[in-house]
Image: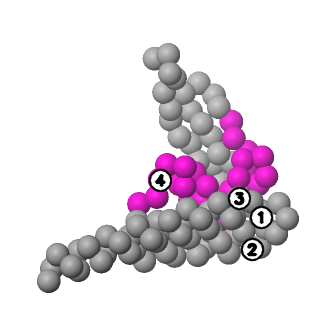
Amino acid sequence: MKKNIFLKKKKEKKIASERIEYLLELGKKTLKSEPKRAQRYAEIANKIKQKFKIRPKREQKRLICKSCKKLIVPGVNCRVRIKGKTITYYCFECRHFTRLGYKHKND
């Protein structure tokens, strides 16, 4: 009985993560033409992520601002700067900076 419950939850999490990925892709596509709809897609993806306790992938983390929880796409509503070993994302909506470290491939 417990094994069936575990498999069911695992399947639900897989479906939820696929939906999150799809919603974020739709959000990226529609951000320029329909920004409100794109933000709604990001909200829904965030709610699904919280409900099923899914850890987002690295690319998905960078698509949502940590401060205002809105969808950010470089060049559209956020600025990306690379200086030294730091990547800085600047959200135009809430004026929040997110700094991430990275390693060069040569190092």
Disc 1 to disc 4, C-alpha distance: 21 Å
The residue under label 4 is 57
Query: For the point 50% across and 35% down, which residue is it?
Result: 101
Magenta-colored segment: predominant secondary structure: loop
Pointers 3 and 1 in contact (C-beta within 8 Å) = yes
Q: Which residues are magenta?
A: 55-81
Give left or right: position of 107 versus 69: left
Local packing at callout 4 (Cα closer than 10 Å; few below 14, some 14-19, many 20+) is few
Q: Earlier in the sequence, mark 3 or mark 2?
A: 3
Residue type at the position of mark 2: Arg
Pointers 1 and 2 in contact (C-beta within 8 Å) = yes
Pointers 1 and 4 in contact (C-beta within 8 Å) = no
Local packing at callout 1 (Cα closer than 10 Å; few below 14, some 14-19, many 20+) is some
Disc 3 to disc 2, C-alpha distance: 10 Å
Disc 1 to disc 2, C-alpha distance: 7 Å
Pointers 3 and 2 in contact (C-beta within 8 Å) = no
Q: Residue furthest bottom?
A: 1
The residue under label 2 is 37
> Residue 41, can we see it?
yes
The residue under label 1 is 30
**Helix, strand or loop for disc 3:** helix
Quarter holding residue 20:
bottom right
The residue nearer to you, when weighing 6 against 63, is: 6
* Residue 28 numbered mark, or none: 3
User: Picture coordinates of residue 91 (x, y %)?
Assistant: 70, 54
User: Picture coordinates of residue 3 (x, y %)?
Assistant: 17, 75
**Taking 14 as reference, is 5 above or below it?**
below
